[in-house]
Image (cartoon, coloured by chain):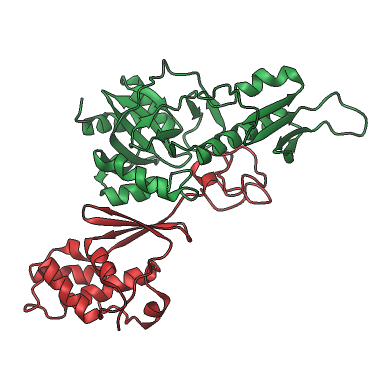
Chain colours: A red, B green
Amino acid sequence: MKPEAKKDALLIEELPGETLIYDTKRHKAFCLNRTTAAVWQKCDGGTSAEQISKSICKEFGVDRQKDPEACSDLVTLALDRLARARLLSDSTRTALPAPRYSRRELAKRLVSIGGIAALVPTVLTINAAASQTATTCVTTCNRFTLGACCCSNRRTCTSTGCDGKKC
Amino acid sequence: MGVRVNPRELINEVASRLPAVAKPATAHAVQRLYWIRAAGEQRRNIKPFNILYVDSLQHEKSLNLNEILSTFEYDVELYVAENAKQRLFVHAGVVGWHGRAILLPGKTLSGKSTLVARLLESGASYYSDEFALLDPDGLVHPYPRPLAMRASPNLGPLKTHVFPGPVPRKPLPVGLIAFSQYEANGKWRPRPLSPGRAILTLLSNTISARRRPRFAMSVLPKVVANAAVVQSVRGDAAETVDALLQHVNWS
């Protein structure tokens, strides 16, 4: 399998040790840690998952001799996290194997072979604020304040009044 | 933007609802036109509605003029926040402290204004209790408006106070960003946030994030670049402010 990253309609900002991605179509923002960002950058549709895991091992100094599968598990988990965030192409997402280990289990394994737990792939996701939800609460609901938070009962405005989700 | 009122006597009340940073303009064309028509004398079989029009379309009508004015105030603020070209509006309380700014981002009812009020009592200067106005260099500008708090910490209408002293004009670099959420028995136990996580959380409080994500993604990294960023629930505001000021190491 040769994973391919989705790159269209994305804004990318590199930070020290992290990569920020903003999806301008879905209005979601993601923060990838160093490992996940490295995996994502190598998903060019021409490099296999095995080649990516070798490269990641080398880049992050994971000892393949102590645990030959640690790197491939690391990459599988990173690909799984990226797929969940829909940062991989549709064809890649359907072809991905399920990760064998959870983040916690993988962190323990990495530590046991002298790696660091911070290498465990993470993808943080948020929805960019709709303008109404990012402002102070409203006293009345109308069609222009849908989604805003009602001051009276801390519920969002719907078409019928202050009876939406808790805010 | 332009505002028409009817009757004329309403103009001072309407003007008091405009952002304090609003200035008269000489342009004849406006991007957005509000018209507030107050109910006249009551006539038989006709309900005395007050009506707010925006760009010639009816926006809201109500028997209560105050509701119309509140909607007008909300809409103006939102429109400005979404469409300002050189400023990024982040929902946050802001104070100045020894040449740098403390940002207190948070959703509505998270207790920003209470913390701002406490910080002012401790000697901070007032920038805003509602929006952090960030310029393209990541500096924060004042957005003065009367400090508004609720009678109860969680619920109830806003109780507006007067301006808490003079508002500085100088933009400041951000020194500390504290994400907090009030909880009745909460204890302030701050944990540091990475720059990436801090930017994500700021994005979720940025008014024009969806409309202008490129601008937001260029400004926010500059804001967090030299700032300490912490997050915690909090209880009593006074205790939190004491603890917050211990984080402040630039004074």
On the image, the x and y values in percent for residue B194 come to 25, 49
Whether A103 is drawn above or below B136: the answer is: below
- Residue B247, by quadrant, is top left
Q: Image point 41% across, 15% down: which residue? A: B166
Numbered disc total: 0
Q: Nearer the viewer, residue B146 or B37?
A: B37
Whether B125 is drawn above or below B83: the answer is: above
- Left or right of residue B145, residue B198 in this image: left
> Is residue A18 something one can see in this rendering?
yes
On the image, the x and y values in percent for residue B21 come to 50, 24
- Left or right of residue A15, residue B237 in this image: right
On the image, the x and y values in percent for residue B52 come to 72, 34
On the image, the x and y values in percent for residue A91 come to 40, 80
> Is residue B189 something one can see in this rendering?
no
Q: Image point 18% across, 61% down: which residue? A: A118
The quadrant in which the N terminus of chain A is found is bottom left
- Left or right of residue B171, residue A158 in this image: right
- Residue A92, by quadrant, is bottom left
Q: Which residue extends farthest right?
A: B44
